[in-house]
Amino acid sequence: MNRIIEAYIENTYGFNVETATPEELQKVTEIMVSDRTMSHDDGEWDFSKFPNLKKIDCSFNPIDLLNISNNHELEYIKFDGARGNIPHKIDFSGNPHLKVVRSGQDGVIELDFSANYELEDLTVFLNSSLRWINIENCPNLKKIDTQGANIPFIDLTHCKKLERVNINYWNLYRKREDEFGPGFPRPIVFVNENFDENVIDEETRKYKYYTYYLIRVKEDSVEEKFLQKVKSMKNKMLSIAPDRYGNGVAHMYYQLIDMYESMKS
């Protein structure tokens, strides 16, 4: 057991985790331990002993392991600014009531929320490693912010309750439009035909020529076929190596746009 968690439980709930009864462990509903350590000796964050845990904040700490698989009541988790060898993929399949996720650090390459039907608010900030987000089964999603996350594309076609959207590379390719090809590399955002573009962040929308590439998807359309083709390239996208300049993601963008133009012609 991570000593930071042990100390927090003893100070907040008044018992020792190692000698606690099941009844005592069930009383733990929040663990808020952001920015507590720089030591990788405390890099394993295993919350499995607390079945009624609803809220976690372990941000700005080394994270070499994050186990929330047994926290079936979890509603909120924040692990942004992590320092360490954070797992490439975090398992959210055991958190059916998850509503808010705050993430944002290099290392994570895939976020799969296919088991999180109740998800409402997702933030993934400043991540040069992220290549894939699955929110197809999140119809209740209201807010999504991936500013500075280098995802090649995102599928919002199933998210019909969106109130705020901010998806961009945060000026990564600004003033580099001639380096890779015409225009600017930017995340391709697939939306349904009734999507209201006004829910996109005003500043992001103002500079859409380099912040995002919006594609409206209708049933049985070229755009729908293109979306399916893009999804079939998952392994290729996950294999794009992270780099601070985003070269691999930029080349993927132009490859996808060329494919789209070819399918339309």
Image: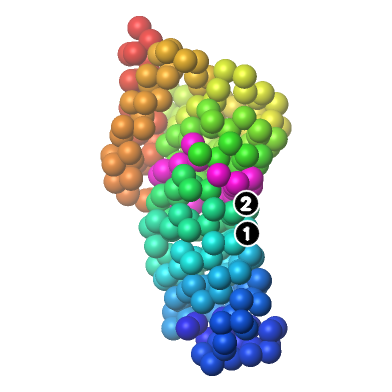
Residue assigned mark 2: 99
Q: Secondary structure at mark 2?
A: loop
The residue at the point 62 percent across, 30 percent down is: 160
Q: Quadrant of the C terminus?
A: top left
Q: Residue at x 47, y 24 (%)?
A: 183
Please indicate whether residue 213 sits to the left or right of residue 180 in the image: right
- Check if mark 1's residue and mark 2's residue have beta carbons within 8 Å: yes
Question: Relative to 222, is 9 above or below?
Answer: below
N-term-proximal mark, 1 vs 2: 1
Magenta residues (range):
117-136
Residue 154 visible in image: yes
> Residue 159 appears at what percent x and percent y?
58, 33
* Residue 216: percent from left, percent from top: 53, 19
How far from the left and from the top, in percent, is residue 38? 52, 79
Q: How many marks?
A: 2
Q: Amino acid at mark 2?
A: Lys
Relative horizontal placement of residue 249, taking residue 32 as reference (left or right): left
Q: Is the residue marked by circle 1 packed among few (<14), some (14-19), or many (20+) residues within 10 Å?
A: many
Residue 76: which numbered mark, if any? 1
> Residue 78's x, y, as percent?
60, 61
Q: Secondary structure at mark 1?
A: strand
The secondary structure that most of the magenta stretch takes on is loop
- Residue drawn at 40 percent across, 51 percent down: 109
